[in-house]
Image (cartoon, grey):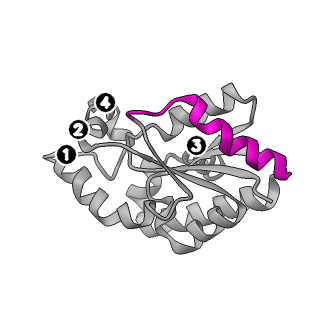
Amino acid sequence: MKRFLFLIGMPGCGKSTWGREVSKAFNLPFIDLDEYIEQTEGSTISHILQNKGEETFRDLEIKALNSLITNISEFIVVSCGGGTPLRPINMAAMKQHGVVIYLKAPLDMLTSNIDNDLLKNRPLLYGKADLMLTLDDIYQQRKGVYEQAHHIFDIRKLSIADFQPILKQCIEQD
């Protein structure tokens, strides 16, 4: 039984925005995994990364994802952090318990979507001299993992209607 719709992709591709839109359009609960981690840890992602390191943060992602999978029985939309699927255990769990959708976007769109004022909330990007080059490096490292998703949606052509057949199939299986 697939109980989750997981949205994955690069920073700036619109995972949280689309997650909220899908949730609203189909009257489904929504969780942003990064926000969930911040709530459960009582700390911001930036603070966790700066003070405890990326490995600790990635461990917290595993813990948070497992908590959601274990404790939520209704169908729910989850936007994941850009690095969440990088741990094979996370991608395997997401694919087993849900439908994984990779929101694919070109680098120029990612760069324009990432507001310079909000870069401080994106610690893996903050302070980098060339944002597009940094995003390209991250993309090259992650694209093979992202492409393991059940579906790949190009955000340049994406509409809320694209989610309907997937959600209908998931909810009918329930």
Residue that mark 4 sits on: 115
Are circles 2 and 1 on residues that touch, CB within 8 Å? yes
**Image position, residue 51 (x, y; %):** 42, 59
Q: Which residue is mark 2?
A: 108
Spot occupied by residue 105 in the image (x, y as percentages of width and height): 35, 43
User: Cα distance, mark 4 to mark 3?
Assistant: 19 Å
Q: CA distance from mark 4 to mark 1?
A: 13 Å
Residue nearer the viewer, 54 or 100: 100
- For label 3, the SS is helix
Magenta residues, dominant SS class: helix
Q: Is residue 74 visible?
A: no
Q: Which residue is identified by label 1?
A: 132
Tag nearer the camera, 4 or 3: 4
Q: How far from the left and from the top, in percent, is residue 67?
A: 73, 60
Magenta stretch bounds: 156-174
Name the foreground residue: 36 vs 156.
156
Give the amino acid at mark 4: Asp
